[in-house]
Amino acid sequence: MMNRIILLFIAVSLHVGIYAQTEKNSVGIDLIQIPAGYFWMGSEGKGENYDEAPMHKVIISKPFKMGVTEVTNVQYEQFDPSHSKYRGRYGLSESDDDAVIYVNYHEAVEFCKWLSEKEGKTYRLPTEVEWEYACRAGTYSLFYTGDYLPDSFLKNQKLYRDPVAVSLQVGQTKPNNLGLYDMHGNVEEWCLDWYAPYSKNDNQTDPLGGKDGLFRVTRGGSHGTPTEYLRSANRIAMIPEDKHWLTGFRIVQAEYPSSNDYVDQISIPINMLNVNQSQHIWTKETKAIFKEPVRYVVAPDCKSGTPFYSHNHCPTITWCNNGDLLAVWFTAEQENGRGIEIIGSRLRKGQSEWEAASRFFKVPDRNMTGSALFNKGGDTLMYFNGVEAAGDWQNLAIVQRISTDNGATWSKPQIIASEHGKRNQVISGTIRTSKGWLIQAADATPEGEGGTAIHISKDGDKTWCDPNSGIPNNFTEGGTGSNIAGIHAGIVELKNGDLMALGRGDAIKNKEGLLRMPMSISTNMGQTWQYTASELPPIDGGQRLVLMRLNEGPLIVISFTHHPYRLKNNGEEGMTFIDSEGKEFIGYGAYAALSWDEGKTWPVKKLITDGKERLLYGQAWTGHFLMDKTHAEPRGYLAATQSPDNMIHLISSGIHYQFNLKWLIE
């Protein structure tokens, strides 16, 4: 009974704003006592905020001291003077009293260890529970100020591409009822926990996150975060090795939690569950094959908990050694939002239908634009993805994961391009050169034109570099530059060791004055590129091509005859094809072209249709379309792989096509 009275007194005290005096430690950090107590953590978890549910009662059994503000530059630099090199990047965090940024999880933990040794007291990061309890300070509104934030809290609270210089000086807004500043905005703050779903158990005492995980929790949002992500209940996370201009930390002075009350383990998604590990024996097909197109984007059961939104797009696909096919893509309500999720599906060996979509990879509350899957050979699958600092798809890092068991499990994400910025929007179509070097293409710009960059690993995926020479791009016939012409480019290695690429946009006029898809050639592994007009028509919004070398030797490009709504190509629509009787006809939509002379000519062009009339749904920007003798899919983001049986597996934003070389050359 007495405990209930004490807890009730604490809860009431938090509401009326009774808080202790601050004390300053040896590096100038003001600390304030946070009393023990209880609260209901989380929210109803609607839409993309599903990870905030269920609301559950949590008891904080012991008081702790917490930094009144985030750690500042002058405080952090007593631990690491070299960190001053980050001051002023993008015009942010220039002054002594600005919140420190560009600190990863491990560096924040090391600061706490250093301070603990210095003072003989235990300093650490707050647990996620401690953070939300301290932030709410007895409130259950969206923010501790109510359901709205005063203008004094608002800085650059919107989706953006270029960071905006604002003051990060701490302690300039109204404190909460416990005397804490900057819990909504300024900078995100690292928490101690591994990110994991909330437990469904009520009446938890000092719970922790997962026993292990992929991400560490961050809380509070930042100076460059839309207001909805500044809410008391909002959950964000980061790869522990990641750091950027949005995130810093605050500390607590308390012993490390002794609780073993970890949350429930994360359930295994269907695409990683019960994966057959037997080696498949591939038999090469000898007859011409074009199989019935099928959907690979299959909506999950609403009770599965898998995020699935209206916009499904930007896929990648690979074959597995066990005979399965694995595809992943993003699902979102808006492409440049933080709610974007990477989900996947598996077509298991011997099956004709893809499984329902299930989770594949998601850094919570980060934009995840751009994915690539690749069968490296041996028993290794590789997966690459862009990870945003904020919401839009410009400021991306690239992460890599490895599977050696047909995609049943994956390694923890390794950051291979750590500086969040342009040149990092991953494109499906990873290749391995004759020297064993890996090449991963990535858009060099968030815009519709401007070119493609490449990232190269010469040591089998351990280290990566961008060979960009930095010279300006002159996307004209005979021009040169440091980017591939066109975004969303496909790349192949030519037999002489050069690289060739084709891309979307940055079209080049040929001798007849017609705009054509740009072809880029590099003789120095991507340091510089030379540009020419190919014989292929250019493509535009909602369209992405495939370029690869087939097992049988020729190059194949799969693209589109024209853009259905924006005819920039001097009014041209469709292309001329030859039917099975040798007669010419005008066809529209997706086609494949073959080259036996390393891309100089493309003598075989075939529309991706068997002539049967079908109404299909292409997802994303494509929607419904009619396939028949003269019409194929009008647009979509294409990705492809060729399995060892020589079947070509082409996916658009929603449809899986299967055919082989013999069908193409009939």
Image (tube, grey):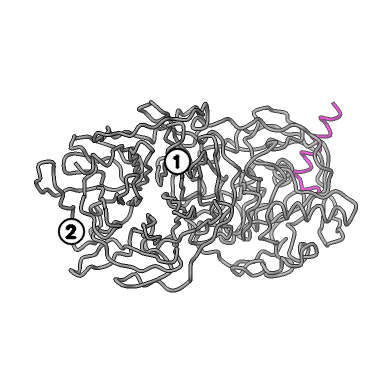
Q: Tag 1, which secondary structure?
A: strand
Residue 11 has which mark? none
Q: Amino acid at mark 1?
A: Val
Q: In the picture, residue 494 is in which quadrant? A: bottom left
Judged by its main secondary structure, the magenta piece is helix
Of the pair 345 and 140, the residue shown nearer to us: 345
Toward the right, the furthest residue is: 120
Residue 328 has which mark? 1
Q: Tag 2, which secondary structure?
A: loop
Q: Is residue 322 magenta?
A: no
Q: Position of residue 274 (x, y in %)?
A: 52, 26
Q: Position of residue 267 (x, y in %)?
A: 58, 30
Q: Bin the neighbour count of mark 2 within 10 Å (Cα to Cα): few under 14, some 14-19, many 20 and up.
A: some
Q: Position of residue 326 (x, y in %)?
A: 44, 37
Q: Position of residue 334 (x, y in %)?
A: 44, 48
Q: Is residue 269 left or right of residue 508?
A: right
**Magenta stretch, residue numbers:** 1-19
Q: Is residue 397 visible?
A: yes
Q: Is residue 330 left or right of residue 33?
A: left
Q: In the picture, residue 166 is in which quadrant? A: bottom right
Q: Residue at x 18, y 53 (%)?
A: 575
Q: Bin the neighbour count of mark 1 within 10 Å (Cα to Cα): few under 14, some 14-19, many 20 and up.
A: many
Q: In which quadrant of the rendered image does the N terminus lie?
A: top right
Q: In which quadrant of the rendered image does the C terminus lie?
A: top left
Relative to residue 581, is residue 176 depicted above or below? below
Q: Which residue is mark 2?
A: 572
Q: Residue at x 40, y 40 (%)?
A: 310
Q: Amino acid at mark 2?
A: Glu
Q: Is residue 32 left or right of residue 317?
A: right
Q: Is residue 221 left or right of residue 571?
A: right
